[in-house]
Image: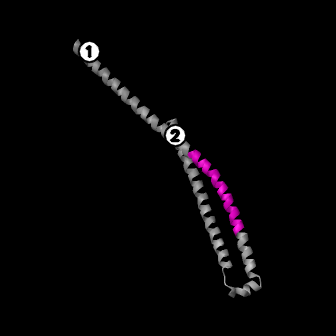
Amino acid sequence: MSDLSKLKQLSDLKYHKSEQALAKVRDRETALRSELKRLQGLAHETHCQPAVDAELRAIGGDIIWLKWLAANQRRVSIELAQVLAQKEVLLVRFRKDNGKKSVAQRLVSQEALKFEAERKRKRLDQIMDMAQTRLGDRDQ
């Protein structure tokens, strides 16, 4: 295995590793966004409740509920912000690994083309030598 093939294999592995890490973070981001949307929906429902729930309001149940929702929304928002920051770092690494993978692939392709051209040139030289030898034998 040539050095370029090893380089390509290594760059492919690094690319797939960064791709998997990014996928995990994206999955976590999706889950957090979904949870945040659910909590926001619950808060909206609470604010839109009719006055028949006066018993809950009388004992402060709605306030306790809204505080719990706000605390959870804040917690999920903070975690989402952390995940988004992590995602940015991983995106930089992913782009870099993708570039390395692309360059390694191009180098391997160029090496293969160069090798094939060299093989064809050698074969043509052999044919030319054989032709010259035969012509030399005829002339004698």
Q: Residues within 10 Å of mark 2 (few under 14, many from 20)?
A: many
Q: Amino acid at mark 1?
A: Gly
Q: Is residue 74 visible?
A: yes
Q: In the rendered view, does 98 fall on the left or right side of 121? A: right
The quarter of the image holding the C terminus is: top left
Badge number at residue 112: none
Element under disc 2: helix
Looking at the picture, tell me which residue is in the foreground, 130 or 49. 49
Q: Percent from the top left, x then y, of residue 109? A: 45, 38
Looking at the picture, tell me which residue is in the foreground, 132 or 28. 28
Secondary structure mostly seen in magenta is helix
Q: Amino acid at mark 2?
A: Ala
Would you place residue 76 above or below residue 18 in this image? below
Badge number at residue 104: 2
Q: Which residue is labeled 1 in the image? A: 136
The answer to which image quadrant residue 28 occupies is bottom right
Q: Percent from the top left, x then y, of residue 36? A: 65, 68
User: Which marked residue is nearer to the observer: mark 1 or mark 2?
Assistant: 2
Q: Percent from the top left, x then y, of residue 4? A: 51, 37
- Residue at 31%, 22% in the rendered image: 128
Q: In the rendered view, does 94 fall on the left or right side of 134? A: right
- Verify whether residue 109 appears in magenta: no
Colour option used: one colour
Find the magenta span and give its range: 73-97
Residue reaching furthest right? 59
- Residue at 63%, 69% in the rendered image: 37
Instruction: First in sequence, mark 1 or 2: give its number.
Output: 2
Q: Compute the Cα span from label 1 to label 2.
A: 47 Å
Whether tag 1 and tag 2 are in contact, CB under 8 A, the answer is: no
Q: Is residue 10 visible?
A: no
Element under disc 1: helix
- Residue at 23%, 13% in the rendered image: 139
